[in-house]
Image: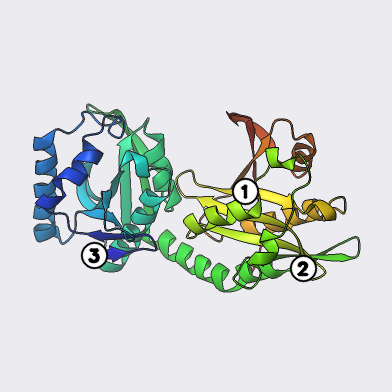
Amino acid sequence: MILETKRLYLREMNPEDFDALYQVLGDPETMWHYPYTFDGRHVRDWIERNMNRYRRDGFGLWAVCLKDTGEMIGDCGLTLQDIDGEILPEIGYHIRRDCQRKGYASEAARAVRDWAFQNTKYPALYSYCKYTNIPSIKTAESIGMRFDREYPDAVNGRTHVSVIRREDWKEDRLSREQDRHGVVERAAGARIETGGTMIELRAITEDNFIEAFNLKLAPGQERFVSHPIRSLAQAYVYRNQCQPFGICAEERMVGYVMVIYDYDVPEYDIWHMMIDQSEQGHGYGSEALDRVIDYIRTKPFGPSDRVALTCHRDNAIARGLYERKGFRATGVEDEDEIVLAMTVAPIQGG
């Protein structure tokens, strides 16, 4: 094993990985932005080329495997590539289609980024792709890369290049450590006053999850929001990228909300916010939403200022609240759900 993250481990690939890798590189949809879809010969050459890189360079594209099952779902690693006439260190990644949009590419690429800066002397790391490959560009941005250049390319038509420099990586790591050990705790645990009542976000733990289970939706709200029981099941699945909270007033839990980070966009999403049917009409939802936004400003999971949520098209009360807080419809709809989003300013100072 070369690298390990919360959900993944990366190891050297070998000829026995042919079938798993063929599912990735032989899939026309996954390879849509590449000049061609790989056949069996190309996949075998790909494995051999990376095995040669391990011997020659000490790195290459590594197999990306799920820790829970050991299943290989793609590759990610560091290679030396000809980028606009220069041989530069490039972070590349390919994830099987059914495993996309779960943050695996960003999680693996982030680990490769840290490994490269810690184990090589390269002053900068790059990622490049066809200029239309927006998902790949977004993944690069999610690990701190920024636009570097575009140049004409006979293969891609135009190639987009992203870069992260060593000094920026160091500064970001320092800032993130300060946030995790200071600001996050204050934002998640701070209390605010509303009409003389103290509102607090409390992380859902083994000590209070039964209180969340006992919350009740008002009649008819089942159309608009999931009960915390279902939400907490989703929180378990996405436990490495989300935080469920109880909304508490005067030591009792009056509601629930979950914050989840989408590594692939990247953005913070607010899910399943609800106030118990007996506690509605006191302004708890409005004040809790302010506290959630304060929490997101600390960037607890990743570097994004974008916050999104969905609202049922018939839920005029909730939509009015969200719009008063600064959310605006994006024009994207998911069945009966309207997607709203806003950009939040980062928290100032320490």
- Quadrant the N terminus occupies: bottom left
The span from disc 2 to disc 1 (Cα, nearest Å) is 21 Å
- Is residue 313 in sight in this rendering? yes
Q: Which mark is residue 191?
A: 2
Residue 221 in the figure: left or right of residue 198: left
What type is the residue that disc 3 sits on? Ile
Q: Position of residue 201 (x, y in %)?
A: 70, 64
| Image quarter of residue 168 | bottom left
The residue at 56%/53% (across/down) is 260
Mark 3 = which residue?
A: 2
- Is residue 161 in sight in this rendering? no
Q: Position of residue 160 (x, y in %)?
A: 35, 36
Mark 1 = which residue?
A: 271
Q: Position of residue 253 (x, y in %)?
A: 75, 64
In depth, the one of 283 and 301 nearer the eye is: 283
The residue at 18%/58% (across/down) is 12
Find numbered disc 3 in the image and state the secondary structure of the residue it sits on: loop
Q: Earlier in the sequence, mark 3 or mark 2?
A: 3
Q: Earlier in the sequence, mark 2 or mark 1?
A: 2
Asked if 335 appears above or below 347 in the picture, the reply is above
What type is the residue that disc 2 sits on? Arg
Q: Which mark is residue 42?
A: none
Residue 288 in the figure: left or right of residue 281: left
Find numbered disc 2 in the image and state the secondary structure of the residue it sits on: strand
The span from disc 1 to disc 3 (Cα, nearest Å) is 35 Å
The residue at 32%/49% (across/down) is 126
Which of the colour schemes (rainbow, by chain, secondary structure, one colour) is used? rainbow
Asked if 217 appears above or below 39 in the picture, the reply is below
What type is the residue that disc 1 sits on? Trp
Asked if 115 appears above or below 88 in the picture, the reply is below
The residue at 65%/61% (across/down) is 245
